[in-house]
Image (cartoon, rainbow, N blue to C red):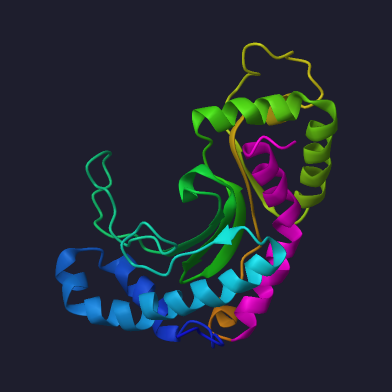
C-alpha cells in the first residue's frame, strides 16, 4: 500500500543513534534490533517513498527502492571492517539515496544523511567511475557545458558544502591554466545542504524542507545526469 504522508522520524530514531555512538558493539546492538526496525528502518521506508515521489516531480527519472537488503535506497547499518583500523561494527547514522540511472553508485542522485545532531541533503556523485570521470573532464573543458557548471557551482557555494576535489594538479592532457582548472581536479562532485535541525527531523515539515533543498540542488543533479548520459 502506498504511503500517503510522513509524520517525521520518531525521536527514538535519533536517540538510537546517540546511544549506538556510545555503545558501538554487537552486545549492545543485538538485543535492540527490533527497536532499530521499529524506529529507524520502518520510518525510513515511508520516508523513501514519500520523498521519492516528490523528487520524481522534479526529475521524472528518479528511482528508489524501499528494500532493506542494502541494494536499494536504505544503506545497511553494518560497516565493512575488513580494511582499515576502525573496527566499529555499525554505522552511527542513517543513509538514504534516490538515484537517476541504472545503478545507484554510477549515477547522480540525492542522498539524505541523518545523525543525532541533525541531517543534510546532498546531490551529485561522491566518486566518479572511470568512464564518468573521463566524460566529466571533457564536459568541464567544453566552453558552453563547463561554463554552465561553473556558474551553477558559484551560486551553490554560498549556501551549500561543495565536495569532490581530489587531485592536487590538473590532470594530464589539460591546460594547467584552464579557466576551470579547479573543477578538473575533482574525482566526484556533490553539494550538501546546511544542517537540518533535530527538531525538524521529527516533524512533517521534513519532507517539504528536503524538497526545497532538492529544488536548489536540481541544476547540479541535472547537469551530471546529462553529462553522464552523453547528451550535453
Residue 147 position, x and y percent, is 83, 34
Query: Can the viewer see residue 182 in this picture?
Result: no
Span of residues in magenta? 204-232
Q: Is residue 206 left or right of residue 127?
A: right
Q: Is residue 31 left or right of residue 218?
A: left
Residue at the extreme left of the image, as rendered: 27
Residue 226 or 30: which is nearer the viewer? 226
Identify which residue, 204 or 86, lies in the foreground. 204
- Residue 22, percent from left and from top: 30, 68
Measured as percent of width and height from the top left, residue 87 is found at: 23, 49
* Magenta segment main secondary structure: helix
The tally of labels here is 0
Residue 68, placed above or below residue 99 = below
Image position, residue 67 (x, y; %):
37, 68
Asked whether 37 or 182 is in front, the reply is: 37
Q: In which quarter of the image is the N terminus?
A: bottom left
Q: Residue at position x 71%, y 64% from top?
A: 58
Residue pictured at 62% horizontal, 54% vertical = 123
The answer to whether residue 124 is left or right of residue 66 is right
Residue 211 is a magenta residue: yes
Amino acid at each position: 500500500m502506498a504511503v500517503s504522508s510522513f509524520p517525521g522520524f520518531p525521536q527514538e530514531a535519533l536517540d538510537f543513534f546517540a546511544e549506538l555512538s556510545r555503545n558501538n558493539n554487537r552486545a549492545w546492538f543485538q538485543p535492540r534490533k527490533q527497536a532499530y526496525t521499529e524506529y529507524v528502518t520502518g520510518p525510513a521506508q515511508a520516508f523513501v517513498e514519500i520523498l521519492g515521489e516528490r523528487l520524481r516531480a522534479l526529475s521524472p527519472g528518479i528511482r528508489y527502492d524501499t528494500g532493506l537488503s542494502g541494494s536499494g535506497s536504505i544503506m545497511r547499518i553494518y560497516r565493512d571492517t575488513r580494511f582499515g583500523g576502525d573496527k566499529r561494527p555499525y554505522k552511527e547514522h542513517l543513509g538514504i539515496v534516490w538515484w537517476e540511472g541504472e545503478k545507484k553508485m554510477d549515477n547522480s542522485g540525492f542522498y539524505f544523511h541523518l545523525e543525532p545532531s541533525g541531517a543534510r541533503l546532498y546531490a551529485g556523485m561522491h566518486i566518479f567511475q572511470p568512464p564518468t570521470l573521463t566524460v566529466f573532464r571533457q564536459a568541464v573543458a567544453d566552453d558552453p557545458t563547463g561554463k554552465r557548471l561553473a556558474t551553477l557551482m558559484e551560486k551553490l557555494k554560498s549556501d551549500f558544502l561543495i565536495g569532490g576535489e581530489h587531485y592536487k594538479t590538473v590532470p594530464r592532457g589539460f591546460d594547467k591554466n584552464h579557466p576551470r582548472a579547479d573543477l578538473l581536479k575533482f574525482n566526484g562532485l556533490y553539494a550538501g545542504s546546511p544542517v537540518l535541525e533535530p527538531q525538524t527531523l521529527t516533524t512533517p515539515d521534513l519532507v517539504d524542507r528536503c524538497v526545497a533543498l532538492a529544488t536548489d540542488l536540481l541544476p547540479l543533479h541535472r547537469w551530471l545526469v546529462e553529462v553522464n548520459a552523453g547528451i550535453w
